[in-house]
Image: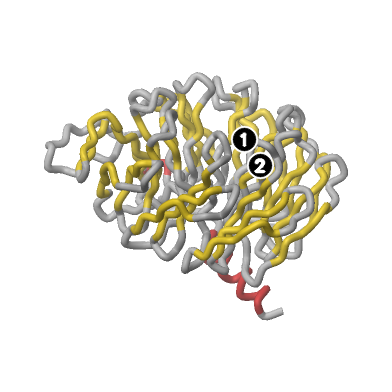
Amino acid sequence: MQVFSSPELSGDGKTVYFGSYSGYLYAVHSNNGTERWKFDCGDVVQSSPKVSNDDKVVFVGSGNRNLHAIETNNGKEVWSYRTGDMVASSPAISPNGEVVYVGSYDKHLHAVWAKTGQRKWKFKAQHMVESSPATSPDGTMVFVGSADRHLYAINTQTGGAIWTFRRASIFESSPVVTPDGKTVIVGNNDGFLYALNATSGSQIWKVDTSDMVYCSPKLTADGKVVFVGSNSGLVFAVEVQTGAVKWKFETESVVTAKPGLSPDEKTLYVGSYDQFFYALHVDSGIEKWRYKFGQEKVANSSPRASLDGKLVFVGTDQSHFNALNTESNIKGSCTVKKSFAAGYEVETRSEDEDTSSWAQVPKKDKKEATKEPEKQKEKALKDYNQL
């Protein structure tokens, strides 16, 4: 079962959360991969978990149509909110921590009260919402893309649209907002990365990536540079103010997973369908090192570095959740701090073997999914395109 879900860290960095197509949300110790708890979401978990501002609850969507709120200390469900279809979108939390926003294949963006799981409002798009929402820094707007080819800016108080931005293709990429709240950046399957005025929705610039942009952009903390991958296999570093391309790096296959940054923002981490995981110099795009995952590839899981920067966590499409040791890397090689297979005895591996597995989704937890998300999405898009 694939690990398309991206890892999330607890506030103290001691726990890492991730979902799997096995239908479970896992909480594991970040230093060694041992399981703290797991929660049965009832269907595939493509959504990435998000921890509440007070670190007491983790939110995640699943294929059983629900948004789940789960206690971080024991893995028990606080509440579940049911949408009209599967939830592949990852939740976002309002700056004040009071509201959770999440998209659904039911064609809506849902706003849910974080404490109770009651609906505040829901916004109807014209097609499914797989894109994950992003809020403005002041919490007055939430932005989300849809398969109806629109990016929406929505008033968080009323749930009404402020503006829409339409393209010729669908939005699967998730938007990001600059720290000053002035600019929204998002990719589109038409092959462009767009920067928009957050207040009006007017286009500021666009960058041609040569192929579809399923990948979601990643901003530096100061909001001056944005990174994004493309189905062209290229990774771009773009100046936010001007849209000028600082550098680009070529992998050997499509890049769909959002890149990640080290805590000091000197290293950019990115996975590719070419089965390699790359570490690049942020300033130049020059490769520091790469790691080959054997027959596995980083599909949708976005890498996340530990708070001290010594580890970087990422999932692959072959059941593995990995912790890579960033301190021991040299170009062309990588080591793992610990190899742990959840639900199995730990195996000692030689240096010649693939040691990327730090935690593996246990076979005994793998159950028949009630839906096949990719096939379902393809059918929905085909039906929509025939309208």
Between 224 and 267, which is closer to the camera in this rendering?
Answer: 224
Examine the rendered structure and indicate whether residue 293 appears above or below residue 381. Answer: above
Give the amino acid at mark 2. Answer: Leu
Give the amino acid at mark 1. Answer: Phe
**Which of the 4 image quarters holds residue 335?**
top left
Tell me the number on the disc at residue 59.
1
Q: Tell me the quarter of the image containing the C terminus.
A: bottom right
Q: Which type of secondary structure does the marked residue at label 1 adopt?
A: strand
Examine the rendered structure and indicate whether residue 28 appears above or below residue 2. Answer: above
Q: Neighbour class for label 1 at 10 Å: few (<14), some, many (≥20)?
A: many
Position of 320 with respect to 86 (left or right) is: left
Residue receiving disc 2: 67
**Residues at marks 2 and 1 touching, judged by CB atoms closer than 8 Å:** yes
Q: How far across and how far down the image is residue 258, in percent? A: 48, 48
Outermost residue to the bottom: 386
Q: Earlier in the sequence, mark 2 or mark 1?
A: 1
Q: Residue at x 47, y 23 (%)?
A: 13
**Which of the 4 image quarters holds residue 111?**
top right
Q: How far across and how far down the image is residue 204, in percent? A: 67, 56
Q: Neighbour class for label 2 at 10 Å: few (<14), some, many (≥20)?
A: many
